[in-house]
Amino acid sequence: MIQTNNITDPKAVQTKIETEHTKPELTQSLLWLITITTGIVVGNNYYNQPLLGLMAKDFQVTEAAISIIAMLTQVGFAVGLLFIVPLGDMVQRKKLILSIFLLIIVSLMGMVLAPTLPWLYIASFMVGFSSVVPQMLVPLTAELSTPEKRSSSIGMVMSGLLLGILLSRVAAGFIGDIWGWKAIYYIAIGCMVALMALLAIKLPDVKPTFKGHYGQLMHSLIHLTKTQPVLRLSAFRGALGFAGFSAFWITLVFHLEEAPFHAGSAVAGSFGLIGAVGALAASAVGKVAKRVSTYTIILVAIFMLLASWIIFYFGGYTYFGLILGVILIDLGLQSMHISNQSTFFALNIGATNRLNTVYMFSYFAGGSLGSYLASQAWKYFKWDGVVFTGLFCTLLVLAAHLLYGKKTSVN
């Protein structure tokens, strides 16, 4: 059971107008469409990671300079989360999502047409900024689900999201090796057009839950953050957990290019398949949550993250060590991520998009920080620097959870 605070937005502009008997039904086919869309769209943000080496050669720049591509994509995603996703509580969500798809298509075209590195920076930011549709579909899933199926439905969609993150690296790595780094973006454009058509047909209309203007909407984000300790703790855990996760994936391709591996983008991308094992296993979190407290699930997830970094330190120069560490880091992060979201979605205060905005903005701001710190750690200390960056972030997550976890959850 989660402790909540009674919440009234400034000037009483928030009202929950959806009820159980009027909201659209979350059918199995719709849940699958949402899951697939989430996985494919989120992949736009991660195609560049195994391709950074190819991009650096194409634009004839250093590894540190090209790594900014990945950081800017995550920064763009965080900014899009902050300024676009809250609109899902204020305007008709279907129309908003379809409009964003047009921006995604234009941004992906910018990636393949960019003539210079600065233009590639801009296009990368816009890809992240526009690819926020998954973070509108996750709260939609929470709204349309029945209470007893909410965790399992969110788990399914979040597994699709993490599989999209991981498998997009696989696809980008192999396609990049065969046809060059631009090919995956041409394929992505075709996928966006197809998904846009399907969503136009299948996605239900959901009435907005916020009555007020955009300024009040944005101010309510601050109000939610101040008044909901469950949200604050989830955001902190998510941000630093994803910071470490991003630090690993951003630098993996550079690590594999050096001794003893001497591997390329295809091998780096293939680690996404290994991470998928963890993503699929984490989908069982919703079932486990019925028997084990959220506090305990998150604690175990954090220990998995810690174990992954220890393995990366001692076994990071062997394929066995990297494989085992990847499974643990993906399983741990995904388990914590699903549990984080389940806790604040259960607040049931008619603000699912805004709650998710605060959480996911923090999440990807943390990812951006992790990407930047990893690029600097790699520049000066190589693999050991990256490992200690991830380990430090995870220790901060553990400290916060031990200090405040039980205070915000009594189950």
Image (cartoon, grey):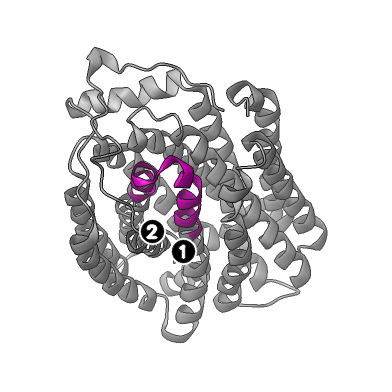
Quadrant in which residue 258 is drawn: bottom right
Residue occupying image coordinates x 28% and y 70% = 189
Q: Secondary structure at mark 1?
A: helix
Q: Look at the image and tell me in which quarter the N terminus lies.
A: top right
Marks 2 and 1 in Cβ contact (< 8 Å): yes
Quarter residue 69 falls in: bottom left
What x and y, as percent, mark residue 133? 32, 52
Residue pointed to by mark 1: 164
In the foreground, 62 or 147: 147
- Label 1: few (<14), some or many (≥20) within 10 Å? many
Asked whether the viewer can see residue 233, the reply is yes
- Res. 348 image quadrant: top left
Q: Residue furthest bottom?
A: 178
Q: Spatial distance from mark 2 to mark 1, Cα to Cα?
A: 7 Å
Looking at the picture, tell me which residue is in the foreground, 206 or 166.
206
Report the residue marked by disc 2: 38
Is residue 26 one of those drawn in magenta?
A: no
What residue sits 70% from the left and 35% below the top? 398
Q: Can the viewer see residue 373?
A: no
Q: Residue 183 appears at what percent x and percent y?
A: 36, 78
- Where are the magenta residues, as a range? 137-159
Q: Quadrant of the C terminus?
A: top right
Q: Secondary structure at mark 2?
A: helix
Query: Quick check: 198 above or below 341?
Result: below
Residue 10 bears which disc, if any? none
Q: Position of residue 391 (x, y in %)?
A: 71, 44
Q: Amino acid at mark 1?
A: Gly
Q: Residue furthest front?
A: 21
Instruction: Mark 2: give few (<14), some (14-19) or many (20+) Cα within 10 Å.
Output: many
Residue at 74% across, 73% down: 259
